[in-house]
Image (cartoon, rainbow, N blue to C red):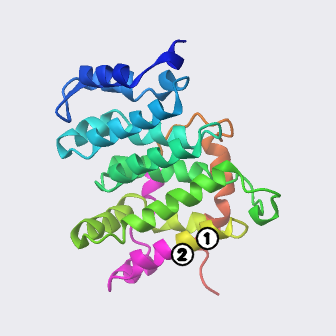
Amino acid sequence: RKANITTTHVLQLVASLGSCSGVITHPTAVKVLLCSFEIWRGAAEEIQTQLCTCIYNLVVNGRNLEHVEKMDVTGRLLELVYDSSVSWSLVQAALEVISSVISTASPKVLLTFGNYLVYSLPTSLVNEHRLKEVTHVVKIRNMLLELLCVLVQSCDMDSDYRLRLQIESTLGFDWLLLFLRPGLHHITFTMTLRLTCILLSPANGFLRFSQKQNHGGWLAAHTARTLRPDNTEHSSLQGSLSYFTSSRDTPDS
């Protein structure tokens, strides 16, 4: 109730309760006080942006990776950016943190990220090109796919190759096909096609795809949670994906 009077000094004090010199010393304090974004929703936009910066500084410290995974920082940030009431400047700040977490190529983080993207898909074969206005969910989906494309084409050859392999083994090639279905927004299609070409570019990448290796990873551990108003049940989601599972497994005539 007093979030509107929160100052930078208060934020720094709260951050110091859970970390020291960029290292998380009290994970519970960080999780409850810093990563519970609903607590800060009434604070000034500048304070919320600084909060994202504070979390970013903890995420980029490799010694905090285990804590970051356990606190589900990725899921909490994705809930934040999918909220249409959040300002775009705060969305951009949150996306920077998400990008830094994804770059670690953690399977748990990638599963959360991948499943939140799946939840952004319509539960029926809706033609998004016929929408009068691009919805917030579609915009965020496109931004997240673009973020992933940028990460797998980074200047660090070792890290982006590791991330490519982890996306393939953790989410699977069929995860990409979900975003190539007819009727989805053209940027969704373009970003996914670009990402697919990158993942198939190694000599043995297309071979693994054609032999249906590394499929279904995103379904094997479908644990993503979301608080978005347009949340769909897993059973409904499965129905909307039947188009792909049936067509993919149909033998060629």
Q: Position of residue 134 (x, y in %)?
A: 73, 56
Question: Amino acid type of disc 2?
Answer: Leu
Badge 2 density bin: few <14, some 14–19, many ≥20, Cα 10 Å: some
- Magenta part of the chain: 194-220
Q: Position of residue 155 (x, y in %)?
A: 28, 72
Q: Position of residue 98 (x, y in %)?
A: 41, 48
Q: Secondary structure at mark 2?
A: helix
Placement of the C terminus among the 4 image quadrants: bottom right
Placement of the N terminus among the 4 image quadrants: top right
Q: Could you tell me which residue is drawn at 48 percent across and 34 percent down? A: 46
Camera-nearest residue between 187 and 12: 12
Residue 37's place in the image compared with 108, above or below, is above
Res. 172 visible in picture: no
Q: Which residue position is annotated with label 2?
A: 193
Camera-nearest residue between 11 and 68: 11
Q: Position of residue 93 (x, y in %)?
A: 45, 45
Res. 64 visible in picture: yes
Q: Which residue position is annotated with label 1?
A: 189
43 in the magenta segment: no
| Image quadrant assignment for residue 201 | bottom left
| Image quadrant assignment for residue 199 | bottom left
Q: Secondary structure at mark 1?
A: helix
Q: Could you tell me which residue is drawn at 30 percent across and 51 percent down? A: 106
Q: Are marks 2 and 1 in contact (CB under 8 Å)?
A: yes
Taking the image as shown, residue 206 lies to the left or right of residue 5, namely: left
Camera-nearest residue between 92 and 111: 92
Which mark, by number, is residue 71?
A: none
